[in-house]
């Protein structure tokens, strides 16, 4: 199945994506509308994402815990903006154990409310602060238009929830976790991202302000790939989370929340994938190297296989314990296998045939450089060292390629007419007055939205691309997923 | 809070358990009836359990995936025994996105049905078999009488679901995974267990037969600690999971499922805990060693702290990377800290005071041997090597103590009168006819149930303890959680 060709990305990007997810066996459609099954290959990728993030969360002092899936409806209603934002998207349990429930329970769409309730029980004194907790789990949001990984009724994510004694500390935490996401995206997933603030109309329901990392996909649309929110005292007041400070006075805490989801798998697919299928960054790839032995008869097989197994052993014994798969299937041809593993995005393919055995070489084929350009012959006794180096090169080249692509498709418009053109097929980077009415106008005219107000600003001020008034910031605009 | 004393286990075992879970900060009650919050300390323990199991699942060829939380009600109804068993326990979503659903969705109580549906899509040929998938996740069962970890509306677990070409292979898988659970319980958790078959009346709803590992808790009641089910072709037929065999004929697959849950945390607490609190097996303990520096003034502190930090570094650098916490709190006394960490079950405490610094020694205090018996003084330059050895000794001694306890409280009754007495305060091991009517009578007379028909049997036959008829097997009976 994985040997059927995909539509090309230029021809039909949406269909290329949908078919790739199925053919690479990352996920499948579930029998419940809008839900997905994450298949073993997709879940192995998610496990690697989880490990890379969890390591960073723990290194910054966070611990994991688990809060209930089911939340009393009344909890949602305690924070006004929060319930307004989420109530259209709720899945509601009304029957339990065969009986109608007195109060309906919501399947969590996010956990600020129930975690806020627990924090109000746990936090008594300044000595209990900060509370730095993360949760890995599933949430449900009743989305109408769904797409595998990008927007599904149920999705998997982590949600960090922290409580602090001061606003400054909570703001620092918000930015620290945004930087953890940036670091993960850049250094593990090879996905270049712009960290910045969301505008008022794009912020999380219940936040004082939201921050985001935004990435450019292969069709030049933007994908919000991780968010970190400063919640001020909104939830602290709604749930009465108070502590006695050093002067023995009651104070409300300041909270944050931050999340990154299986949506990020979509970001990886749409940043690196090509017409042959998935291309995985080596650091996150469940399998980094596939070895395909090549032989036409039993005699050749008996020469090739021992060498193949020795090469595998050397790669597995590499100091970084490279993740290797040996494809010994006899019912398909080597050519079929090449296509198969290209579809699944394995970064490096090692081919070993009778000629290679005779020459004491093996052939390397890089997934990021299909065809001859990515092919090299390596002396057999140097396989492990070269494999490690080439994986590093692939990781770097994927990042650089994506960065160049983003740069090449990001433009600074000289006027609103040019702005409108740019956002039809790329990102616009431009001065903006940061007023909702201008944002609304842009959206109505172009379907593009303010993706983020980057943390890094040129300074000074300019003229808003939309209204011409004084603009305090430069902003990225794009059509988005 | 953790310094408040627990009720003693003899006095009130149930209350000892409930208070311990709260005071050791393993879990807390959620605002939804019967739900729990697993706090960071409890979750860190669960993460270690997960790692120990996941490693074993992968070593036996399994991969992880994720299937939807929400299952169409009609799926449950496809397997008759399954729906009868689970329908009284369902949480049902009837509203989604503000609208009444045409077909209600069940929050999964277990996933045989939806996984069966997906397997029927994925499995076409004998080449696709076996399918060996595990899922880590949450499930909801509407239980009426709940208890933290042991029985909660929502709980966390793994559920393995496999499909095979033959009955033999599926039966082997069922027993293989039971042995994985046994190995985990014994070698990681130091919990002795009896692996065996469930009787007809105790088997999983929809299984041909169920297997279990049964453990004796500190109050001599039994706890079913993990189960593995041979499902025959029940779900294959209900969901039409068929494959073309080598002769190109359509066959139904044979399936298994197996699960171990956060309930196992209850098993660890009730197997090893004592009147001072939790006692954790070193291999699973989130913190294996706590270091408590002892000083009365700044001068002593300045002498003690550098040594303490050096000792910590040596323990962390141990080849097994021991998990160490240094308690530098100044607002509480060392005595308070001792109680605190005893409540939390840290296997080994290291105390370092000015005298120890002068003598080039440190004091070790074993959690499994409170008081003087567990205290030794170790030369400072041998801390790491001794710490590793003593942790191994604690692991062994916990297992042996639990095994001796079980042996001392398991008896072979000579007649039914003695049987009835034994099961009031221990386990009975006895010949049994294995008929449901005898099992029902025993349950009615004693409240004890057949815990398992152990895999290991003496052979031959005896007389049923209840009816006196020919009995093919020896069985464990006990009151159970």
Image (cartoon, coloured by chain):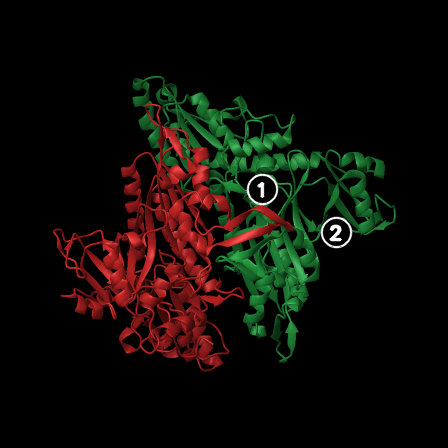
Chain colours: A green, B red
Provide residue B284's location: percent of width, then percent of height: 37, 59
Q: Position of residue A44 (x, y in %)?
A: 47, 42
Residue bearing the label numbered 2? A201
Residue at mark 2: chain: A
| In the rendered image, the vertical position of residue B24 relative to residue A182, given as above or below | below
Distance between mark 1 and mark 2 Cα atoms: 26 Å
Q: Which residue is the site of mark 1?
A: A34
A428 or B55: nearer the viewer:
B55
Position above or below: B335 against A163: below
Q: Are marks 1 and 2 in contact (CB under 8 Å)?
A: no
Asked whether B335 or B31 is in front, the reply is: B31
Q: Which mark is residue B391?
A: none
Residue at 49% from the left image edge and 27% from the top image edge: A2
**Apparent side of residue A192 relative to residue B431 in the rendered image (left or right):** right
Position of residue B8 measured from the top left corner of the image (x, y, whole percent): 34, 77
What residue appears at the point 40 percent right and 52 percent down from the top-left corner? Answer: B85
> As rendered, which of B191 and A256 lies closer to the eye?
B191
Camera sees residue B264:
yes
């Amino acid at each position: 199945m994985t040997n059927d060709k995909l539509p090309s990305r230029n021809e039909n990007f949406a269909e290329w994506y949908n078919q790739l997810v199925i053919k690479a066996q990352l996920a499948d459609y579930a029998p419940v509308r809008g839900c997905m099954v994450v298949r073993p290959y997709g879940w192995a990728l998610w496990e690697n994402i989880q490990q890379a993030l969890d390591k960073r969360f723990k290194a910054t002092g966070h611990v994991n815990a688990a809060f209930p899936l089911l939340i009393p409806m009344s909890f949602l209603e305690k924070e006004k903006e929060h319930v307004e934002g989420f109530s259209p998207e709720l899945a509601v349990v009304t029957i339990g154990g065969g009986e109608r429930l007195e109060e309906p329970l919501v399947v969590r769409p996010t956990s600020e409310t129930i975690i806020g309730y627990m924090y109000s029980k746990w936090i008594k004194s300044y000595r209990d602060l900060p509370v730095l907790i993360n949760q890995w789990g599933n949430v449900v949001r009743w989305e109408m238009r769904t797409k595998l990984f990008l927007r599904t009724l149920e999705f998997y994510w982590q949600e960090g929830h922290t409580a602090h004694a001061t606003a400054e500390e909570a703001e620092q935490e918000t930015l620290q976790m945004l930087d953890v996401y940036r670091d993960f995206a850049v250094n593990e997933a090879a996905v270049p991202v712009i960290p910045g603030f969301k505008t008022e109309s794009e912020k999380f329901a219940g936040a004082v302000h939201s921050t985001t990392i935004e990435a450019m996909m292969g069709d030049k649309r933007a994908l919000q790939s991780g968010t970190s929110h400063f919640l001020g005292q909104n939830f602290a007041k709604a749930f009465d989370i108070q502590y006695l400070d050093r002067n023995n006075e009651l104070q409300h805490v300041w909270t944050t929340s931050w999340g990154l989801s299986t949506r990020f798998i979509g970001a990886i697919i749409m940043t690196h994938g090509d017409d042959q299928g998935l291309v995985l960054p080596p650091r996150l790839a469940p399998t980094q190297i596939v070895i395909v032995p090549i032989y036409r008869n039993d005699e050749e097989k008996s020469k090739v296989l021992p060498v193949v197994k020795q090469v595998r052993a050397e790669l597995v014994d590499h100091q970084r314990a490279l993740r290797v798969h040996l494809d010994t299937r006899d019912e398909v041809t080597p050519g079929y296998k090449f296509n198969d593993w290209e579809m699944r995005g394995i970064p490096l393919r090692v081919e070993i045939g009778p000629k290679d055995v005779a020459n004491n070489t093996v052939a390397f084929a890089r997934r990021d450089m299909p065809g001859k350009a990515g092919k090299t012959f390596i002396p057999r006794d140097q396989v492990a060292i070269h494999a490690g180096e080439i994986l590093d090169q692939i990781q770097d080249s994927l990042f650089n390629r994506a960065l160049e692509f983003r740069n090449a498709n990001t433009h600074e418009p000289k006027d609103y007419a040019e702005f409108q053109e740019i956002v039809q097929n790329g990102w616009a980077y431009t001065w903006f007055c940061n007023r909702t009415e201008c944002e609304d106008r842009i959206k109505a005219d172009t379907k593009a939205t303010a993706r983020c107000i980057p943390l890094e600003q040129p300074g000074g001020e300019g003229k808003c691309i939309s209204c011409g008034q004084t603009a305090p910031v430069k902003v990225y605009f794009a059509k988005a997923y």
